[in-house]
Amino acid sequence: MTRTPSQSRSLLLNIADQLDYELTFQEMVRFMSQDQVEDFMTHLCEVADITDLMPAS
């Protein structure tokens, strides 16, 4: 079956809702390329309050 990128995204979001969040997050981070990690961290800081999870500088 061929899916559009939008359909694939929707399917993955539905599957993620049914999986263990920690496992899903770990697998997503492992799959990302190194250059995407920093952008993702910046995005997380913008959409979620994760400052208490960040190590002190």
Image (tube, rainbow, N blue to C red):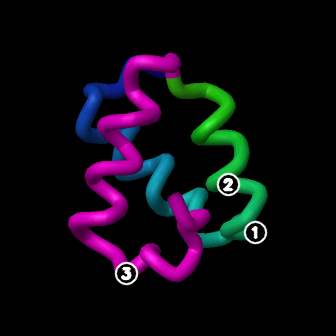
| Rendered view: 51 above or below 15 | below
SS category of the residue bearing label 2: helix
- Mark 3, residue position: 49
Residue at position x 56%, y 66% in the image:
56
Assess whether mark 2 and mark 1 are in contact (beta carbons under 8 angstroms). Answer: yes
Q: Position of residue 35 (x, y in %)?
A: 40, 18
Q: CA distance from mark 1 to mark 2?
A: 6 Å
Q: Quadrant of residue 2?
A: top left
| Rendered view: 50 above or below 12 | below
**Three-letter residue code for mark 3:** Asp
Q: Tell whether 43 sits left or right of 17.
A: left
Q: Tell whether 9 sits left or right of 33.
A: left
Residue at position x 45%, y 49% in the image:
11
**Three-letter residue code for mark 2:** Thr
Density class for disc 1 (Cα within 10 Å; few <14, some 14-19, many ≥20) is: few
Closer to us: mark 1 or mark 3? 3
SS category of the residue bearing label 3: loop
Which region of the structure is painted magenta?
Answer: 33-57
Closer to us: mark 3 or mark 2? 3
SS category of the residue bearing label 1: loop
Label 1 or label 3, whichever comes before in sequence order: 1
- Mark 1, residue position: 20
Provide the major secondary structure of the magenta segment: helix
Q: Which mark is residue 24?
A: 2
Residue 36: say if magenta. yes
Q: Position of residue 40 (x, y in %)?
A: 37, 43
Q: CA distance from mark 1 to mark 3?
A: 20 Å
